[in-house]
Image (tube, grey):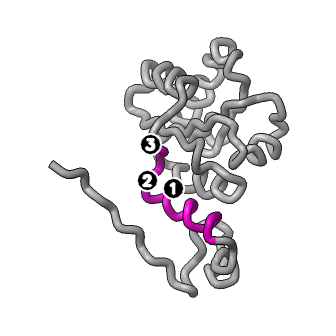
Amino acid sequence: MPAPTTKAKKIGRNDICFCGSGKKYKFCCLNKKAEVAVPRIDIFNNDQQRSSSQRILTCKQAFSAVFPDVKIIDISDTLTGFSYKPFQERNLEKQILMIAEKQPNNQSVFERRGAFEEDIIVMFRGSYRVFKFEDFAKVFDSICDMIQHRLNGHNE
């Protein structure tokens, strides 16, 4: 059986921009380079890249064991300075844990959060944690506490 396909909705010039700025598309991302705009459309259709690194798979496996009802997605390839806020806003009320490994396309996301040495970011319902993968065992409980805190309805 062939995999179902999704067709991207065409964005009109007067629609609110998909980047989360709140501006009309024609005043925001319409004239930006295609290589920046197109991947941002795809991230909201696909939510996840095709394959994950072993480090991301290790994180996903550990979190899945503790939170079996939470969907865990790898956004390493699609996380950028433009997509960080829309990812957080779009998944604010959902049970979706987003994980990304530092790459050239998302380095600014890490740097804007003061994470120059850290190489993994975990995002859940508006909260985030950045850490070095080699410290994953040390920060795992803290990240689980953050997730549980959000699942319990606490937003601070």
Q: CA distance from mark 3 to mark 2?
A: 9 Å
The residue that label 1 is drawn on is 43
145 is higher (above) or lower (below) than 5: above
- The residue lying at 52 percent from left, 64 percent from top is 41
- The residue lying at 70 percent from left, 46 percent from top is 106
10 is higher (above) or lower (below) than 66: below
- The residue lying at 38 percent from left, 32 percent from top is 69
Secondary structure character of the magenta stretch overall: helix
Q: Which residues are magenta?
A: 34-50
Q: Secondary structure at mark 2?
A: helix
Q: Earlier in the sequence, mark 1 or mark 3?
A: 1
Q: Nearer the viewer, residue 144 or 46?
A: 46
The residue that label 3 is drawn on is 50
Contact? badges 2 and 1 (CB < 8 Å): yes
Q: CA distance from mark 2 to mark 1?
A: 5 Å
Left or right side of 42 for 142: right
- Res 142 → quadrant: top right
Mark 3 surroundings within 10 Å by alpha-carbon count, few (fewer than 14), some (14 through 19), many (20 or more): few
135 is higher (above) or lower (below) than 104: above
- Res 115 → quadrant: top right
Query: Label 1 amino acid?
Result: Ile
Left or right side of 3 for 90: right
- The residue lying at 58 percent from left, 77 percent from top is 16
The residue that label 2 is drawn on is 46
Q: Nearer the viewer, residue 28 or 42?
A: 42
**Number of marks drawn:** 3
